[in-house]
Image (cartoon, rainbow, N blue to C red):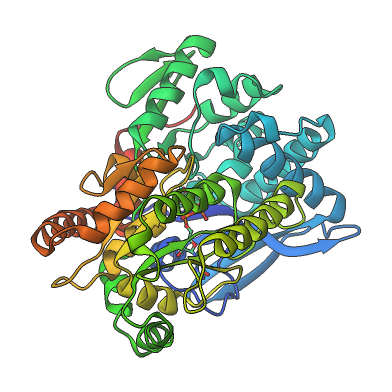
Amino acid sequence: MTDLKQSSPHRLVAVSNRTAYGSQTRAGGLAVALWDTLAESGGLWIGWSGKIFDVPRRRVQLVEEDGVSFALVDMSKAEYEGFYLGYANSVLWPVMHNRLDLAVFDSDYFAAYESINRRFAEAVEAQTSETDIVWVQDYHFFLLARHLKDAGCKRRTGFFLHIPFPAPEVFRSIPNHMTLAEGICAYDVVGLQSPHDCANLGRYLHEEMGAEKLDDERYRIGDHVLTMRLCPIGIDAEGFSLSATSEVAEKASNRLSRFLGNRNLVIGVDRMDYSKGLPQRFEGMATLFDKYPELHGNISFTQIAPPSRSVVEEYAQLRQQLDELSGRINGDYGDLDWIPIRYLARGYEREELAGLYRLARVGLVTPLQDGMNLVAKEYIAAQAPDDPGVLVLSQFAGAAQQMTEALIINPHDRNAVAEAVREALHMPLDERQRRWRALYRGICEQDINWWRDHFLAAFDTSEPAD
Ligand code: GDG
């Protein structure tokens, strides 16, 4: 394994759109896992400064925090709009989540995407050396390694895609899909969330680029060998489990309990995003209320949905759709002493969420497409072992390919959602415990540190870029 922790000759350099620099709460997950390894290898994190200038500073800003160095890159307002709101979030995000109908193919967006990828590549070249391992995160930077190569800059590069890789038929609809694919192929190691994603990318590379499969992970494309690693992301399962009994968690749980009385809690927690299937979930709950009047007054569905990317039109529309839908369902089924759907369009602290998950008899995670879905894993981590709740999980979340002991459903089928919630509510304790134990074991074995180490170990067998 590539041991970046002990005086390894390789320094780790992370690249992501947003870094964890200056964030007050560096709680859990990716930020901590990267931070730890970066600090131990004397590493560097390159990302957007979060600042928008009329004329961006050309020089990157170098800062340090808790043993990690940061190189922060600026953007202009036009770049932010073209690269981030435009190409990343109005082209790549919808297409990769199978929502071609929402994609806005504007050639100015692609120009901005290329230019920001080039600027980040220049920052990588300037701030790193040939012995470093450069680990690039996510769909914002498909082209970064390609730009490095074009500039004659030799680096060992890895790329992790947090979101799904769609069927080749869908990916091909992006006007610049070949350029993006050449970008992918310029990396030494590409990590994906699920076997499904690996199969899709493998088929695309074979059909479009004539890639030859050498073994389980390696593809030859021209004279370059690409390692494609199945590397499902995890959480800090033990840490999250502990935080579910913290003071903050218990306080949040008590606040909600006072309102709940002895009703069973069904919980959903999602960024407000059309990939998360929120309208379909609300409709599924309406079907439950419709079919089973005996449940009225006996359960409470609480959906936490902090708004995100709200300046993008589709997100504003989703907000309106959810406002209307929850109002309609509460109007139809609610009573003087019962609100069927509690829909909270705001965020809570991480520890508060842990407490709320623990209180919930059912965790409802029903995205229409999702790279992994960490909420599913957090819900399991937060449960009390002697009285665990039940996870209802969409077959279209990457997590479903690992978490097979959940109740797996098709999120488009509102009847299936309703029946799974009912089954979860009636599930006997011994079955709940049996399913939970298997799920908890899984998320502990393949946690966030496993994910990081498994990805980086791929560099031991990958061939350096020419
Ligand atoms: C992308 C991929 C992949 C949510 N509400 C609050 C809050 N959250 C936290 C959750 C969870 C995180 O946000 C969401 O993670 P997901 O995995 O569900 O989804 P994306 O943001 O879409 O992430 C996804 C992930 O990358 C990692 O690879 O799993 O498929 O789309 O941790 O707890 N956190 C706080 N308050 C909230 O109100 N503090």
Q: Is residue 103 above or below residue 54?
A: above
Decide if residue 284 is in sight here.
yes
Outermost residue toward the right? Answer: 54
Q: Is residue 145 left or right of residue 10?
A: right
Q: Residue at x 50, y 72 (%)?
A: 335
Q: How many marks?
A: 0
Q: Is residue 23 left or right of residue 409?
A: right
In the rendered image, residue 133, in percent from the top left (x then y), is placed at 45, 47
Quarter of the image for residue 6 reads bottom left
Q: Is residue 397 above or below residue 50?
A: above
In the rendered image, residue 329, in percent from the top left (x then y), is placed at 56, 58
Q: Residue at x 27, y 44 (%)?
A: 402
Outermost residue toward the left? Answer: 430
Front residue of this view, candidates 143 and 173: 173
Q: Residue at x 51, y 49 (%)?
A: 283
In the rendered image, residue 423, in percent from the top left (x then y), is placed at 25, 52
In the rendered image, residue 409, in percent from the top left (x then y), is placed at 34, 41
Quarter of the image for residue 172 reads top right
Front residue of this view, candidates 207 and 158: 207
Front residue of this view, candidates 156 and 100: 100
Q: Is residue 169 left or right of residue 295?
A: right
Q: Is residue 41 above or below residue 219?
A: below
Decide if residue 444 is in sight here.
no
